[in-house]
Image (tube, rainbow, N blue to C red):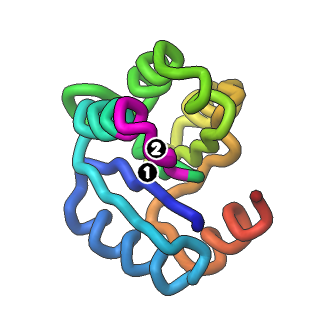
Amino acid sequence: MKRILLIDDDEISNFLNKSMIKKSGLFEEVHVLSNAVFALEFLRDLESENKPFPDVILLDLMMPIMDGFEFLKELDKMDSRLQKSLKIVMLTSSLDPKDRISALNNPKVIGFLSKPINQTKISELLGTKD
């Protein structure tokens, strides 16, 4: 079963992105959380209950409270089982090329998508990844 976790503070984007992900047929489970702190708690709960982690995380770069880069730093402190299996795609409206370079320098980050996402972007990036 393929699972995806979408982390974004924009509720409208979450609604649209969740719909687009479901239409792609690439994932059977889609979890949506509105901030990175909630996402870390969600992952810790999965870890403590020994439940499967998401196969992919779509992570918004610019969020209040904790941004995408801070989330990645906190993720490094978690279970090695999570570290081995996790694939992250940064999702952003940022036009700063430094953000793209910084994100793609993280070994867990497999891609960088500009908002809004669409079927083509999802299929090209996620459809070819195991």
Residue at 53% x, 17% y is 76
**How busy is the neighbourhood of tag 2: few (under 14 within 10 Å), some, or many (20 plus)?**
some
In front of the other: 62 or 127: 127
In the picture of the structure, the residue carrying the numbered disc 2 is 94
Q: Quadrant of the N terminus?
A: bottom right
What amino acid is at disc 2?
Answer: Ser
In the picture of the structure, the residue carrying the numbered disc 1 is 93
Q: Is residue 37 left or right of residue 97?
A: left
Magenta-drawn segment? 46-54
Q: Quadrant of the C terminus?
A: bottom right
Residue at 47% x, 19% y is 78
* Residue 76 seen in render: yes
Residue 100, located in which quarter of the rendered image? top right
Residue at 57% x, 82% y is 25
Residue 48 drawn at (x, y percent): 36, 30
In front of the other: 64 or 45: 45
**How busy is the neighbourhood of tag 1: few (under 14 within 10 Å), some, or many (20 plus)?**
few
